[in-house]
Image (cartoon, rainbow, N blue to C red):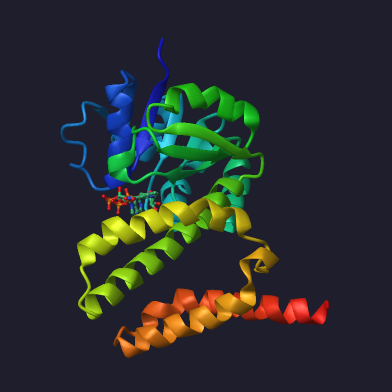
Amino acid sequence: RMTTISILGLGAMGRALAAALVNAGHDVTVWNRTPGKDGGLGARTAASAQEAIEASDIAVVCLLDDASVRETLAPIAPNLSGRLIVNLTNGSARQARELAKWITGYGVRYLAGGIMAVPFTVATEGAFILYSGPRELFDEVAPALAPMARPQWAGEDHGFAALYDMAALSGMYGITAGAHHAIRLVHAEGGDVEAFRQDVLRPWMDQMLSIQIDGATPSGAIPAEFNAQMQAVALQTMIDNSAESGVAETMTGHLSAVLWMMRRSIENAERNR
Ligand code: NDP
C-alpha cells in the first residue's frame, strides 16, 4: 500500500505540493480553511483539519504563518496523539522550536520543514525541502514526500530547517537587492538593460557566486585576500555613483552593509597589527 498523505492549506504552495503527490500516485486528502480551493486537484476533501490529519499516514501542514498553524491545531491538539505531522509553514527558528515543544507535548510525532522552492518549481530538479526533528521520522516520511521536492534532513533540532531556510533566503535577498539596483542604475544612465543583464550581470554573478559563499564568515570579517581597503574605496565610489545617477539611497542599503563590514575588517586588521 502506498503511504497516504494529507495536505492542510491550499494556498499557492499547498496546492503545488498536493498536485505533485497526486501526480506521483499517492492517495491525497486535502483541507483548506476556506472551502472551494480544491478544484482540479484529484484529491479527497476533508471537512475539518482534524478529519484531514486522521485520514492519512502523514499530515503536511502548509499555512500562512506560525499563528495560523497554532490557530488551526490548538483546538484539536489533544486528539492528535500518535499522529505524524510535518509542518512546512514558514516561521522563525524560535517559533519552530516552540511549536515542536508544544505539539510533541500532545504525543504528536513531529517534523518541521522549510521549502526551498516556489510553487512553480515544486517537483522540479533543483527544488528541495529541509526537514528537522527526529532522524527516524525523516527516514520514515522522506520516500513518500520526495515527489514534492528532494528531501534533505537539517538535524535533530526542530528549529534548524527554519533557521537554514531563513539564512538561505537572506542570501537570496542580497542578490535581489543587488540585481534590482544594478538594473536600475543601468537604466537611469541610458544603458542597454537587456544586454547588460545577459552579457554582464549574469556571467559576473555566475563567476562570483561560489567565491562569495565560500568567503562569508560568521563575524563579517573579510578574508585578507579580498583586500578590504581597496574594496571600501570602491564601495564608496559605487554609492556616490548611484547618487550621481539619481538612484535612490534606499536601493544602496546592501552596499552600505558591505562597506560597514569592510571598514570593520580594516579596523580589526589594524588593531591586530
Ligand atoms: P498563500 O497566501 O497562497 O496561502 C496561505 C494559506 O494559509 C491558505 O491556504 C490560507 O487559507 C491559509 N491560512 C491563512 N491563515 C490561516 C488561518 N488563520 N487558519 C487556517 N488557514 C490559514 O501562501 P502560500 O501557499 O504561497 O505559502 C504557504 C506557506 O509556504 C507560507 O508559510 C510560505 O512562507 C511558505 N512558502 C511559500 C513559498 C512561495 O513561493 N509561495 C516558498 C517557500 C515557502 P484560506 O484560503 O482560508 O485563506
Q: Is residue 39 left or right of residue 229?
A: left
Residue 213's x, y, as percent? 56, 54
Q: Is residue 92 left or right of residue 56?
A: right
x 62%, y 58%: residue: 215
Instruction: Choose top left, top right, bottom left or bottom right for residue 243.
Output: bottom left
265 or 94, which lies in front?
265
x 63%, y 79%: residue: 229
Considering the image in quadrants, where does the C terminus appear? Answer: bottom right
Residue 72's x, y, as percent? 41, 48
Total label count?
0
Is residue 5 visible from the viewing direction of this image? yes
Considering the image in quadrants, where does the N terminus appear? Answer: top left
Is residue 10 visible from the viewing direction of this image? no
x 72%, y 82%: residue: 267
Residue 83's x, y, as percent? 52, 30
x 39%, y 68%: residue: 177
76 or 138, which lies in front?
138
263 or 97, which lies in front?
263
Residue 103's x, y, as percent? 57, 43
Q: In the displayed image of the protein, which residue is found farthest to the top?
A: 1
210 or 256, which lies in front?
210
